[in-house]
């Protein structure tokens, strides 16, 4: 029986070309393939697999471990796997700054390693690959988009997407939509403007560019005091977005404005920083926006996954988008129009005076950073951060690793035209928890507060097996019962989970893969 | 919080066995590149600064030159003025290496924009380039930003607040005697808000000892100082220095006495004004 399964799998793989990604896989929930950063376009991180489930997960055990060995070099000695690996035809593909790997998804055996010779840039993380046919795409700290051959890891080409000398650095996983390779940039050290680009998968040439801040005379310019402020206004595009093929809209959360904590030189709402935007992936034209944090001064990027939910409102089916935002609000929007349906804090906050008629928070000026310090909830790390949440259509719950926290925010640059961060924050106290929110209301259905002390937050995965997988702040990978939050299984890893757990099925066997420090762990059921 | 009954005990043990074999596995997985095994990566000033840090003497010379020759238009801090653009954020100045980009502009001027030519030597141009790089890096290096005066509140109101809320544990003549001589006002402010944030980050001071008592299903009680806790395990060191580690299974009771519970309760109550007043009072305890 087993031989038959193996043979048919091999034949199927052979008919497609051994490593090639069938584009149809991009439009289906992830089962034998995990072809994008979030598993599919929806950003739900929901797997329909249920071989590992709430009734048998206690028998899940280690299958293999792979070490992402970079050795001495630009990646530093503190490598963390923040990428969610792709899994295509039995091979895992992932990256850390300057390095990329292909690993056998059944055994954890290295197939190839690629090294990028860096020209600099902040080496803080890499979120992995996008894949198009036989080709893999990833970004480097010095802002190159690199195209590799999935078969052997050889480089096909590289193109520069931003200037490292202007303090850009790049971390996101490119998102592939048809023949568009959508790439974002990062870097908020020195007041550079953010943008998103679509690149040609064959040549790397620019197809379109969308600026996260308006240029003079464009719509949105009225939310900035002058040309200089908006052209140095930040708004980085450092996380992959989500996509609705029916509406043909790409959804992206944008980063914080610059200067980061000194808002006196950029009075106004500062569009389209800290916003959720809907873009046409063929043209880069914006269909609508919703600003999660108008005039942010607390480094609260709104890059958290815009999760696409096909749900119900008032008994009618509705295309929805949910974001558990770093500023502490849960937002539910109509993803066709951007109309706000819910804005509700999921963690205590003290910086907002409520929401306006569009459902956007109104920041309290008294809680902006001050020279003598302002006590702000949540702290700078946020109520949540970039690690991915998950949504289960089975439970109707959105699972968010989150924190209750306090920080002091200091304004250090009082110049009328401040620079860089223009301020500092000092984290005082924090407590980490996994929060399960009712997607329709944003109400907390259950919450597990971790006893482990630490500041990290991992990504989350949920499955049709009534399970939620998440990491705690000290290094436990935990399986929760999705409906109730009851803990069913755990394993202490060598370091806190640094990426989002992912899962796939091969030869009738379900695997769970998670990154912890520089180790990639593969789990499966005991034989 | 409820802890599940460990149906998975055997599996967890098996997992531990597999993990204990890990070091050997890691050796097998070590990178096999042809580069020699260097001991550690090259030291960096910090992770935010990825370009060479200029020589301070050159920066100083460059600053003098800049203020005298360029400051009138570009501002003495190089962040722009009435007639000249910001050079800290200037793409040309950021792309510059040792004057290779700004040099030609300085020597030829940009007469169409009203900038005259300056007859500077290549050494002087290098010094100005060093000054501009230092200005850029000062903006980039947020961890080095200087926090200004934080003792802005009313010390009398701070004293009254202290006496009503803090006096049951602390006294200005006792444990806090001379505290303002020990910590600068910025450190003092975050320490009274929540002392452990510093210990956690290793910014001086030890972790504040947390008493814990573990009662096992058998009724045996062990008390000591908390070493580690998560949802599944707890570890402590008893008064004789012995280390004890326990699984938090059924019937195991863990009582942690948070020595900072009072600080946390107040943290949730302070207004910014309360905080400023307290800081203004505490800085008087020299």
Image (tube, coloured by chain):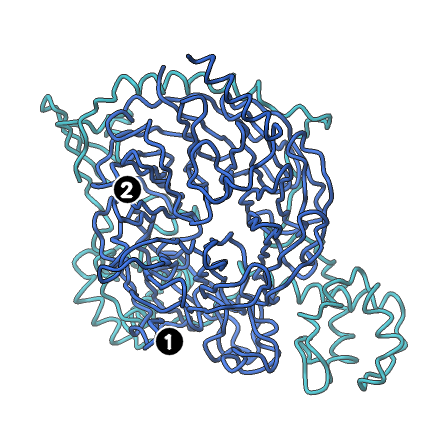
Chain colours: A blue, B cyan
The quarter of the displayed image where residue B164 is located: bottom left
Residue linked to disc 2: A450
User: Closer to the camera, A286 or B170?
Assistant: A286
Of tags 2 and 1, the one toward the viewer is 2
Q: What's the chain of the residue with tag 1?
A: B
Label 1 crowd bin: few (<14), some (14–19), many (20+), radius 10 Å: some
Q: Which mark is residue A54?
A: none
- The kind of secondary structure element at disc 2 is loop
Most extreme residue toward the left is B219
Establish if A203 lies above or below B35: below
Q: What's the chain of the residue with tag 2?
A: A
Contact, mark 2 vs mark 1 (Cβ under 8 Å): no
Disc 2/disc 1 C-alpha distance (Å): 37 Å
Residue linked to disc 1: B152
Q: How many marks?
A: 2
Establish if A89 lies above or below A426: above
Q: Position of residue B241 (x, y in %)?
A: 29, 27
Label 2 crowd bin: few (<14), some (14–19), many (20+), radius 10 Å: some
Say which residue appears at 23% left-offset and 30% top-offset: B239
Q: Position of residue B109 (x, y in %)?
A: 86, 79
Quadrant of the image containing the N terminus of chain A: top left
User: Closer to the camera, B240 or B68?
Assistant: B68
The quarter of the displayed image where residue A485 is located: top left
């Amino acid at each position: 029986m087993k031989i038959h399964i193996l043979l048919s799998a091999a034949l199927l793989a052979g008919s497609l070309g051994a490593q090639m990604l069938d584009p149809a896989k991009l439009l289906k929930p992830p089962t034998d393939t995990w072809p994008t950063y979030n598993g599919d376009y929806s950003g739900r991180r929901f797997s329909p697999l249920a071989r590992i489930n709430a009734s048998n997960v206690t028998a899940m055990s280690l299958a293999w471990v792979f070490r992402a060995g970079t050795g001495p070099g630009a990646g530093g000695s503190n490598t963390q796997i923040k990428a969610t690996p792709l899994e295509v035809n039995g091979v895992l593909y992932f990256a850390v700054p300057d390095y990329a790997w292909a690993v056998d998804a059944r055994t954890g055996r290295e197939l190839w390693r690629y090294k990028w010779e860096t020209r600099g840039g902040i080496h803080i993380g890499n979120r992995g690959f996008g894949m198009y046919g036989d080709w893999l795409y990833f970004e480097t700290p010095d802002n190159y988009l690199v195209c590799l051959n999935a078969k052997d890891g050889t480089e096909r080409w590289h193109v520069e997407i931003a200037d490292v000398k202007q303090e850009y650095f790049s971390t996101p996983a490119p998102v592939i939509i048809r023949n568009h390779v959508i790439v974002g940039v990062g870097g908020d050290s020195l007041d550079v403007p953010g943008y998103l680009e679509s690149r040609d998968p064959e040549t790397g040439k620019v197809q379109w560019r969308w600026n996260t801040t308006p240029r003079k005379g464009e719509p949105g310019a009225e939310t900035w005091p002058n040309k200089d402020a908006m052209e140095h206004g930040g708004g980085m595009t450092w996380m992959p977005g989500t996509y609705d093929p029916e509406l043909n809209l790409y959804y992206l959360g944008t980063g914080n404005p610059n200067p980061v904590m000194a808002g006196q030189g950029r009075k106004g709402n500062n569009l389209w920083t800290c916003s959720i935007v809907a873009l046409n992936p063929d043209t880069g034209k914006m269909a609508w926006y919703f600003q999660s944090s108008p005039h942010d001064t607390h480094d609260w990027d709104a890059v958290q996954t815009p999760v696409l939910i096909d749900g119900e409102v008032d008994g009618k089916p509705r295309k929805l988008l949910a974001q558990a935002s770093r500023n502490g609000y849960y937002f539910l929007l109509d993803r066709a129009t951007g109309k706000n349906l819910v804005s509700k804090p999921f963690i205590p906050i003290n910086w907002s005076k409520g929401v306006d008629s569009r459902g956007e928070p109104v920041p309290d000026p008294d809680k902006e950073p001050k020279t003598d310090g302002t006590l702000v909830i949540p702290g700078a790390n946020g109520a949540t951060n970039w690690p991915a949440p998950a949504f289960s259509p089975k439970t109707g719950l959105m699972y968010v690793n989150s924190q209750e926290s306090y920080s002091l925010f200091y304004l250090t640059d009082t110049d009328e035209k401040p620079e860089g961060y223009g301020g500092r924050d000092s984290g005082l106290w924090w407590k980490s928890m996994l929060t399960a929110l009712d997607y329709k209301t944003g109400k907390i259905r259950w919450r597990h507060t971790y006893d482990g002390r630490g500041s990290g937050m991992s990504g989350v995965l949920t499955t049709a097996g009534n399970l939620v997988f998440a990491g705690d702040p000290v290094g436990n990978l935990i399986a929760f019962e999705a409906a109730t939050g009851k803990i069913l299984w755990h394993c202490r890893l060598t370091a806190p989970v640094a990426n989002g757990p992912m899962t796939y099925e091969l030869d009738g066997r379900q695997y769970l893969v998670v990154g912890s420090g520089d180790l990639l762990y593969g789990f499966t059921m005991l034989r | 919080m409820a802890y599940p009954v460990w149906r998975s005990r055997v599996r967890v043990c098996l997992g531990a066995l597999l993990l204990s074999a890990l070091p050997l596995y890691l050796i097998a997985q070590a990178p096999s590149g042809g580069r020699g095994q260097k001991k550690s990566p090259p030291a960096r000033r910090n992770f935010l600064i990825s370009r060479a840090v200029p020589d301070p003497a050159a920066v100083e010379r460059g600053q003098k030159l800049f203020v005298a020759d360029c400051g009138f238009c570009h501002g003495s801090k190089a962040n722009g003025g009435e007639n000249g653009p910001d050079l800290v954020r200037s793409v040309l100045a950021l792309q510059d290496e040792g004057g290779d980009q700004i040099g030609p502009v300085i020597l030829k001027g940009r007469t169409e924009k009203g900038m005259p030519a300056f007859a500077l030597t290549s050494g002087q141009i290098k010094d100005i380039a060093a000054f501009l790089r230092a200005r850029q890096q000062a903006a980039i290096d947020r961890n080095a930003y200087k926090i200004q005066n934080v003792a802005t509140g009313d010390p009398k109101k701070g004293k009254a607040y202290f006496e009503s809320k803090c006096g049951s544990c602390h006294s200005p003549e006792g444990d806090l005697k001379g505290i303002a001589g020990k910590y600068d006002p910025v450190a003092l402010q975050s320490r009274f808000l929540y002392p452990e944030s510093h210990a956690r980050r290793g910014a001086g001071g030890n972790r504040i000892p947390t008493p814990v008592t573990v009662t096992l299903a058998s009724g045996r009680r062990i008390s000591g100082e908390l070493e580690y806790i998560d949802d599944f395990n707890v570890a402590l060191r008893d008064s004789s220095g012995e280390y004890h580690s326990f699984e938090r299974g059924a019937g195991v009771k863990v009582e942690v006495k948070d020595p900072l519970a009072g600080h946390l309760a107040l943290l949730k109550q302070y207004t910014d004004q309360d905080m400023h007043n307290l800081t203004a009072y505490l800085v008087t305890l020299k």
